[in-house]
Amino acid sequence: MKKMGKERPGQPGMDRRDFLIRLAKAGATVGVAAGVGYFLHDPFGPRASAEKPPGVLPDFIVPGVGKKIAIATGGGRIKAIDGAIEALGGMGSFIKKGDRVLMKVNCAFASPPSLCATTSPELVAEVTRLCFRAGAASVAVTDNPINDPESCFSLSGIGEAARSSGAELILPRESLFTEFTAPGSSLIRDWPVFTGAFTGVTKLIGICPVKDHHRSGASMAMKNWYGFIGGRRNIFHQNIHTFIKDLALMIKPTLVILDGTFTMVSNGPTGGSLSDLKKTETMIASTDQVAADSAGARLLGKTAKDLPFIMQAERAGVGTADFESLKPYRVSIG
Amino acid sequence: MRITIVRRINQAFFLALFLWFCLCATLGESFWRLRGWPVNWFLQLDPLVALGSIATTRTLYAGLLWAVVTVAITALLGRFFCGWVCPFGALHHLVGWIGSRARSVRERIEVNRYRGAQRSKYYVLLFLLVAAVGGYFFKLDSVASSSLLTGFLDPIPLVYRSVNLLLLPLADSSLRMVSASQRHYDGAWLSGALFLGALLLNLAIPRFYCRFVCPLGALFGLLGRYALWRPGKKSGKCSQCGLCNSRCEGACDPAGAIRISECVLCMNCLDTCCDNLMGYNPFRSLCGETLAPDLSKREFVTTAICAMAAVPMLRLDGRLGKNYDPALIRPPGALSEPDFLDRCIRCGQCARVCPTNVIQPATIKEGIEGLWTPALNMRAGTSGCQKECTACGKLCPTAAIRPLSLDEKLGLGSFRGDGPLRIGTAFVDRGRCLPWAMDKPCIVCQENCPVSPKAIFVKESFPEVRDGRLAVASLSGTTACLSAPVKAHRLDTGDFFIALQAGGVADRRRIVSNSGDSITFESGFSPELRASAGQKFTVQIRLQAPVVDPKRCTGCGVCEHECPVSGRRAIRVSAEGESRSRKHSLLLRA
């Protein structure tokens, strides 16, 4: 260097200013690299992913209403649901002004309403109307169907019924599901749950038909919550009774409505033929989902004791299997 | 000593060190085996590995911190790594030198002139980094995300992969130093084609890969632009003879306005300059410098857009979701597939160190993103995944396979609650399994199941063999005389039984020996049975048919490896149940 300096005194090449600028920039490069290395250094690497702590879904039970059940018979769906709700004190005792209602229908299959594999669209429309009349600010209808969601909502007529009665439709999108661990559940752990459907919701109503179900014995109000589960949820069929109980523990609805106008007595839960249906002309509305299922079981010719998930749910304290003890309001419509 | 001699010694040293580390990545206890040798050191020095994994994971795993050293030296001195350290560069240098020996000075000047196409390596770098960093800005789902593709062309993973999975197994096939039996690597030809192709291109243009392709070189070119010392002319009084260009490794045009970002610091120009004008100086070349690579805005934007489009195109096949390939079994400790792909640089170290050779580089069957990532092939190696081995995760330089303790792998100690780590679940193919499908005793799978209690249990049965009716002329004690002959010794293997059915009751006795016309069995039938009317004698075979207990199976694949149905095995591991993905669960927990 000395030699070079001697060779070129005052030559533009030995530019001290340029050298210092480069020194600063190279120094900055080194500094940035060292800083990034320091801050991002991870000496241990990723661990096995730890399970998230349990989360809690909102409780939609209306305080003070208590456990009630109404069983309306005859008169067709509209009159029956009107009668049953009236018997429970009217929709106004559940839905207050400004409430944002989420309606969980059973829209599992891309099947026409006549086959009763899905919630009746006229029932969806009528309950929506009742909610709005009671002052609801919004009503949203949702399910995470088994078949293609859009086909299900369109073929079942539920989509059209919701739209025409002013309810919003929430289709399952990946972003609406979060990994969720339900407290006290040994099964729902770090599992995708449709939590996005609950955003802003203040009241929850479950509405579904009464259906035969080969694995669990019956698909009714408690099993309807299966539609809040995402992922490869059929894995839970390995322990379905406990799973339905866990669903019932996780979801605390304002009201459940079991539509037994027709009961799918065979080939459930898909049905597929009118001969799978039996006219039972019963509408059950209850604040106690265990009692509702217990009453619904009768329509399938079963009792609560035939359906282990009902007895498990009762033992877990979700509700009572002895629905008669709730002194049901029985409404008979001409 | 001339600086170029020092450089050659350096290159030779680092190439030898690299090859030594490749050799050392062998499990064992000799001094030359994996006993603390820093076999990943070259990968850790590679700032593209570091930058890529920062882009996808926002962390810098363990030894990757070494990259800071490389970056620092490059920022101060220029692309020293390319010309002095890089083992791949040394190989290019050597082959290019061989290719240029017969060239005249004029030809050398021509072949080593700067070409505009040398900017392509910057686009390669840009493409790889944009693809890797995309997820930082939009991670809508697994499709619109980022992907770490640097390992395909990053020279250090490339040379590791090529030496480990191609040259070493070839060399070892006669030396038998690294492993007792020939190591096989699926699709090694493709890896080899890239490696040899890159080397052979040096015969056309020296350091072809370094000049036109190498994304790491491009990164160094950018990092070294402010280098304090830089090659250049010490005086403006240059005769423009152009000799310095004749041996220029980087094709950086030292005779003209030297392109600092292309210079690999080979220092040949210092040697070749007749007037001793060239030097490695703290000032810029007195004939001027060309600083920036010739990038155009249009090409830059096009490349970036292509990279952003490439990842979604690669991922639209849905392999990261429902359409996952159940035949893809990752090594134990591999992260969930998206996280795994965020880290794997395809260096092949896991496949190299795996003692059973069961870890294979995945072929194009697993998609472009899966290419050369580790996948277990239970048929290929000498066994399945060894129960007591955690070598692959310990060696993985980026924690794509995270380091496991033996306790965690086996579900012991504080991991007891989690159970053993599973890489999949074995399924019996009852249509191919000898006992299930063909009434042949076997259960090799059950015997070899390393889990305790075994994950494979058996169902015992005694079916009647084909044409199993025995024509018994007389029965005395433990011997039955036959009226129709049977082949001698056919039934005395210990698996055959003689069954006697009479009056609704049945009993069986193990056959001890048989000649052509009599059968001896271990103990006599009860007098009542012998006295009953309507006696029917048959030959039964005792079968034990394997059944997998999915709660115990870890997917290690020893059963699949050992299954005597050698082609398509009768018991095969499938990815269902692998610990790394809850979405692939087979069983409910609890």
Image (spheres, coloured by chain):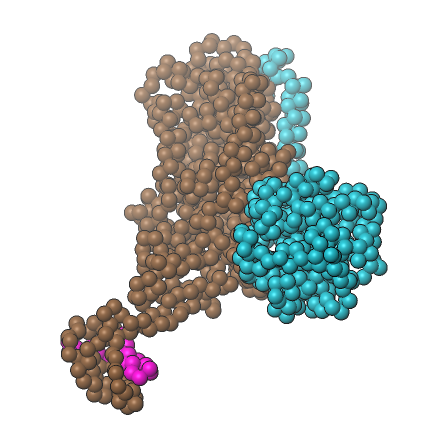
Residue range (magenta): B496-517
**A181 horizontally vs B252: left or right:** right
Q: Is residue A222 above or below residue A4?
A: below
Residue at 54 percent of width and 48 percent of height: B335
Q: Is residue B64 above or below residue A328?
A: above
Q: Colour of chain B?
A: brown
In front: B137, or B193?
A: B137
- Residue B192, percent from left and from top: 37, 37
- Residue B275, percent from left and from top: 47, 14
**A270 horizontally vs B456: left or right:** right
- Residue B47, percent from left and from top: 55, 35
Main secondary structure along the magenta-highlighted residues = strand
**Quarter of the figure with residue B107:** top left
**B82 horizontally vs A192: left or right:** left
In front: A254, or B100?
A: A254
Q: Which chain is cyan?
A: A
Q: Is residue B24 above or below residue B364?
A: below
Instruction: Look at the image and tell me in which quarter the N terminus of chain A lies.
Output: top right
In front: B339, or A113?
A: A113
- Is B60 magenta? The answer is no
Instruction: Look at the image and tell me in which quarter the C terminus of chain A lies.
Output: bottom right
Residue at 53 percent of width and 57 percent of height: A267
**Residue projecting furthest to the front:** A334
Residue at 48 percent of width and 55 percent of height: B424
**Quarter of the figure with residue A215:** bottom right
- Is B514 magenta? The answer is yes
In front: A136, or B56?
A: A136
Residue at 51 percent of width and 41 percent of height: B318
